[in-house]
Amino acid sequence: MRVTLIITPATELNIPSIALCSLAGKLKDEGHTVKVFDLNKYLYNAAPDTAKKEWGEIFIDDIKTAEFINSNKQLIDSTLDLILKDQPEVFCFSIFFSTALMSLKFAQYIKGFNREKTIVFGGPHCHPEWWGKKLIKNENVDAVVIGEGEETLSELLRHLENNKVIDNCPGALLKKDGQIFDFGFRKQIKEINKLPFLDYTWFNPSDYTALPLPLSRGCVNLCTFCSVNGMWGKYRTMTGNRVFEELKYHMESLPERTEFYFCAPLINGNLRELEKLCDLIIESVNNESMKKPSWSGAATFRHQMNGGLLKKMHEAGCSNLTFGLESGSQKIIDKMRKGFRVKDAVRIIKEAKEAGIKTSVNIMFGFPTETAEDFNETLVFLDQTKDYLNYICPSEGLCYFNPLSYVFYHLDEFSIERDSFDELFWESEDKKNTFPERFRRFNEFAEFTKTLNVEVQPSCEQITSALKERLDFYYKKMSS
């Protein structure tokens, strides 16, 4: 079949979508003709500078999205012509919180051109506990893929290609003649080693600062605020050998590119396989069978990580690690069930710096039960590690709980007001932890970081601008 894979604004601009790379590789292996469009990148490059400045905020707001479309009608029309040019039979959209509005708009335009075209939505926010059941009710969406897409989308396309009545397709919500069919969940892919290599042929590598690489799915941690395991299921990792073979393949195919990013919740979930990967890279670089790559990714603090491993990682090309610190208070870290000790976090950051690896830490504001004293411990931690940190990454949502997170289903356990619960604007039962209070703590953090000489990404100015709009919405909502 002729299949087009699409990601719309707004999402990551510097790295191609690993989901589209993986799906393209799988579908091409099965004989489909596949086109891929990063409309996020395409529209951003053509958009006016005023839109570029607030790119991440436009497409999560109905009014701003409509204004962008109306102000750039010629661009939208030419983009629609582009994706319709080769007359694909099936259009598949990658859905995140920030891409849903534009995806629904393009689905509407495609159906307006030809109602016989099949529209499939898939991605993290298509889980039935999130937006999946709502999306399948949209008149322009024919199917929603839940969870991992490779096997489900492949089976769905086989049915469509053979004009078969689809009476069973685990992992999909399907609509036929107005009736919705829920085929339940599909078993997760156990042998992710067997997945095809990512397909890079659909984009110009020079358009991106780094290229995506697979490594694992799911997470070894069970953080109470996180939805990763709810979406991905049990943690699975590729072997060091499998990851090395794919890295080597891409470097041979694109000898001018050496920058890669591991698109996984964490790269150090299996330290044995990570070390094996490093050994293979070092051996190949030393015998001159490959150039030295540069790679980075997200990581957790694990007490087994030591200076020796970090030095080996750097020798193998690790340039940057982003750690999910979230808080400097051991009490709050334990409440989050992050599974590390503050003293290990301090040690690992220092040893990473000594090994030559740049480090970043993520920070949240106002996790349930966090007191002013707890928050001050976070500031103390940042001051203690300022000479070793390269970046501090504050949460743009401060502290929010989406479906599939543990907190979302256990509000009472975290003393969160149930009757007025909102993912972003939630309040503690004692009314001491509110959105304005979390914003106040962020402002305290913003002032404090001015003394550290450590870069904040995104900048506090960028986040403050977006948070002020949300604060206005909060007060309107509370007064209504």
Image (cartoon, rainbow, N blue to C red):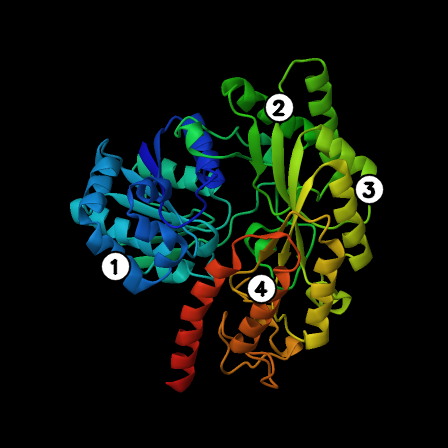
Q: Disc 4 marks which residue?
A: 446
- Quarter location, residue 398: bottom right
Check disc 1 and give the amino acid type. Answer: Ala
Name the residue at 62% across, 38% down: 296
Counting from the top left corner in percent of width and height, residue 474 is at 43, 77
Tell me: 318 left or right of 420.
right
Looking at the image, tell me whether mark 4 or mark 2 is earlier in sequence order.
Answer: 2
Q: Residue 26, can we see it?
A: yes
Check disc 3 and give the amino acid type. Answer: Asn
Labels 3 and 2 touching (C-beta < 8 A): no
Please identify, in this view, whether the residue under mark 4 or under mark 3 is nearer the observer.
4
Image height check: is 223 above or below 92? below
User: What's the CA distance linking mark 1 and mark 4?
Assistant: 32 Å
Counting from the top left corner in percent of width and height, residue 203 is at 40, 30
Q: Disc 2 marks which residue?
A: 245
Q: Disc 3 marks which residue?
A: 306
Name the residue at 42% across, 60% down: 131
Check disc 4 and give the amino acid type. Answer: Ala
Labels 1 and 2 touching (C-beta < 8 A): no
Counting from the top left corner in percent of width and height, residue 289 is at 65, 13
Looking at the image, tell me whether mark 4 or mark 3 is earlier in sequence order.
Answer: 3
Looking at the image, tell me whether mark 1 or mark 4 is earlier in sequence order.
Answer: 1
Looking at the image, tell me whether mark 3 or mark 2 is earlier in sequence order.
Answer: 2
- Quarter location, residue 355: top right
Q: SS at mark 3? A: loop
Please identify, in this view, whether the residue under mark 3 or under mark 2 is nearer the observer.
3
Tell me: 115 left or right of 248.
left
User: What's the CA distance linking mark 4 and mark 2?
Assistant: 43 Å
Image height check: is 18 above or below 421? above
92 vs 80, nearest the viewer: 80
- Classify mark 2: residues with Cα within 10 Å, few (<14), some (14-19) or many (20+): some
Q: Disc 1 marks which residue?
A: 66
